[in-house]
Image: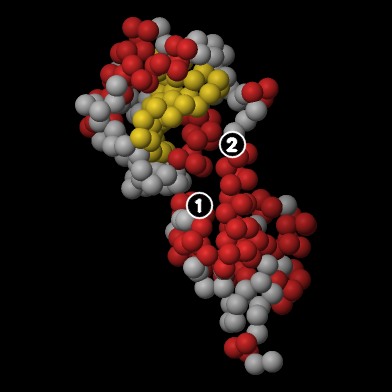
Amino acid sequence: MNEQDHTYRITDLAQSERPRERLARLGPQALSDSELLAILLRVGVAGENSVQMGQRLLQTFHGISGIHRASYEEVCAQHGVGQAKAAQIKAAIELGRRLTVTSPDDRPAIHSPKDAADLVQYEMSALEQEELRVILLDVRNRMLDVIEVYRGSLNTSQVRIGELFRSAIRRNAAAIIVVHNHPSGDPAPSPDDIAITRAFVQAGKLLDIEVLDHLIVGHGNFISLKERGLGFS
């Protein structure tokens, strides 16, 4: 068989370098993103093993979050991927997303901005347009629900304060955390973000529902306006 016709398989790698064997020996957390993708891809293409193919996909889409944001058709169209591999990759990412949705009997308590971000960041960092969501909390800061309130550019003239608190009042929430994303990937707050945070905080005081924080989610990172003292003074 000629080199250019050869399809590279995981078994073509030295045993110590094979992702599946490394996962079994060291655990999935020890593998790189490209190695985890290689396990899903199983085989490479001519001149490129599955790990290298995983690296190419990560570079093309700018990381795992980029693959998450990409459509099924866009992943399918990559050289050597096709429908079956694209479906496997998309299914694996969706399973990871669903792990962030906790059952009512095991509701997480929010003790820090990171705790709150962990609930929504995986999904919201992949959104192509701006969304505002509210995390409803009970008196022990345990999550009651995450509600989508608004979709579109966030500014003080478009977002109705009443909509933000409607679900909190209905669910008898003691506190809320506001979260929205910046599709650009840069979570730096705008003047509108700060102004609307101030409005949320003041309304919460009138309704006796504390606004604990306002998080802005970017691509793989987030900012807490409360930690920065923006809109909460």
Tell me which label, 2 or 1, sits earlier in the chain: 1
> Residue 23 occupies which quadrant of the picture?
bottom right
Question: Residue at the location (42% across, 44% down)?
Answer: 127
Q: Residue furthest bottom?
A: 2
Q: Choose between 110 and 69: the one closer to the eye.
A: 69
Residue 97 screen position, x and y as percent: 57, 42
Which residue is rendered at x = 66% and y = 78% of the image? Answer: 8
Left or right: 12 in relation to 140: right
User: In what quadrant of the picture does the N terminus appear?
Assistant: bottom right
- Whether residues under marks 2 and 1 lie with C-beta atoms below 8 angstroms apart, the answer is no
Quick check: 117 left or right of 16?
left
Please tell me the numbered disc located at residue 28. none
Q: Secondary structure at mark 1?
A: helix
**Given the image, on which type of amino acid does mark 2 rest?**
Thr
* Residue 93 x, y percent position in the rendering: 58, 50
Q: Residue at x 68, y 67 (%)?
A: 42
Helix, strand or loop under label 2: loop
Residue 51, percent across and down?
A: 61, 68
Distance, label 2 to label 1, CA atoms, is: 15 Å
Residue annotated with mark 2: 100
Height in image: 106 above or below 98?
above
Residue ID at (65%, 80%): 7
Q: Is residue 72 above or below residue 178?
A: below
Is residue 123 at least partly visible in the picture?
yes
- Residue 9 placed where, x, y %? 69, 74
- The kind of residue tagged 1 is His
Location of the C terminus by quadrant is top left
Q: Could you say which disc has been placed on residue 68 in the image?
A: 1
Label 1: how many residues lie within 10 Å, few (<14), some (14-19) or many (20+)?
many
Q: Callout 2 environment at 10 Å: few (<14), some (14 to 19), or many (20+)?
A: some
Residue 194 appears in the figure:
no
Against 104, residue 114 (above or below) is below
